[in-house]
Amino acid sequence: MGNRGDSLKVGIIDYDAGNLKSVETALKYLGAEYFVSSDPDRLLKSDKLIFPGVGEAYSSMEILKTRSLDIMLRDYFIKGNPILGICLGCQIVLDSSEERDTSCLGLVPGNSKEFSHNMGLKIPHMGWNQVKQSGQHYLFTDIPDNSSFYFVHSYYPEPSSPGTTIAKTDYGISFSSAFSMENLVAVQFHPEKSGPHGLKMLDNFIKPNWKGGQ
Amino acid sequence: MLQKRIIVCLDVRDGKTTKGIKFKGNVDIGDPVQMAEEYYKQGVDELVFYDITASSEKRGIMIDLVSQVAEKIFIPFSVGGGIRTLEDMKKVILAGAEKVSVNSSAVLNPSIISEGAAHFGKQCIVVGMDVEADISKPSGYGIVINGGRKRVDLDAYEWAKKVEALGAGEIVLNSIDADGTKEGYELKLTRMISEGVGIPVIASGGAGTSQHLVDVFNKGKADAALIASMVHMDGYTVGGIKEYLKNRNIPVRI
């Protein structure tokens, strides 16, 4: 575990959703103090929370419920400390997902939709794509507009309130690739696998002076 | 816009990057971790590590190497070579690789693709296909295994459709005929497979100049291009190749 004198403890939620190793190594590289856990009580005490994940919405929600991590996430959101959702973690914070008609956490109004197979596009949307910032958000500090980030997904988030979108990406349609509501930010791409810009984004999130919001 | 990926492949033997040289066999050309860091700095989009270690007792070296790479570079990378079981897959994924690549083992045991996809997600499973021209096959191309040494009775197009149906997330399409020629990718084959499947296709084999990459994206319709000797031996840089592509209106991450 890394340590940087002025940093806070970052909790990474472990719910068997894909590989957490890359998020972990990125935080270690940045010198963050972090821990990986599936214990709701421990995670609730973290200063900042990362909700990563690669996988399938329905079974991931089931695991979250089994471990009472769904309740922890709602409590944490109400508590007001910063949360960063990544990939599946970004979709699950919405009300629902078209992936096996899954009812999700409902922290942010909206749902996740499947990319249409009729657009002649390859699915999953896999590779580097540009992220167009809508205005200025703390998460994008010192990251140039239209920088590329790494994506791997077949469903995309659609927050229903347009004001929540902080960045958009084109893949057949223009979708919300980053959104924010109160103390929560969520990104569809993988900052931990997006080279220097991705590391900068994680660093922006773990900076001690950011308490959430714009 | 989704960008075209440039992927550098490193063949690794006993922990060293190696390159097959005609009549000389394999020659060590450097430390894979240092080379990976260098290509990362140059802006490579992804890396592939292919384990060609002959002896099974030295396979552990590869896992250590994967862990070291994962701590230093923050882009996706895949690991292939000698992966036959779910347990083999799990080892490299836990060490920090995003993806695992199966080739001959998938031909011999296709269910490894579906099992891998069910366990780790489709996006983790890359199927490598070694292909050579074969007029006896309906598509004109057949599959070879064991590094191109053994023909099997599989049509390349049919096999590509099958691996997609089994749950492969991507295909690395390697032309045995073009490999090592430096005369360009096999465009006809690449286009046929890339337009025939709904998953990304990474073209491999034959790259000698930056123009070859332009051709494989424009004419071959590839989603990504694999390169090796251009950057290992021939003085090209990833940044230089990308600049060339960008100036010819190929969308790349600069």
Image (cartoon, coloured by chain):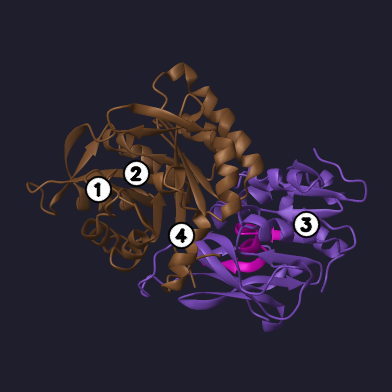
**Residue A120 location, x and y as percent?**
35, 72
Q: Name the residue under label 4.
A: B241
Give the secondary structure at mark 4. helix
- The part of the chain drawn in magenta is A85-98
In which quadrant of the rendered view does residue B96 lie? Answer: top right
Q: What residue type is labelled 3?
A: Asp
Is there CB contact under 8 Å for labels 4 and 3?
no
Q: Mark 2 points at which residue?
A: B128
The reply to whether label 3 and label 2 mark residues of one chain is no
Residue B178, disc: 1
Q: What residue type is labelled 4?
A: Ile
Q: Chain in brown?
A: B
Which residue sits at x=84%, y=51%?
Answer: A44
Would you say residue A153 is visible in this rendering? no
Q: Chain in purple?
A: A
Which residue sits at x=33%, y=48%?
Answer: B166
| Viewer-closest of A101 and B12 | B12
Could you tell me how far apart the alpha carbons at marks 4 and 2 are, in whole angstroms? 24 Å
Tell me which chain the residue with mark 3 is part of. Answer: A
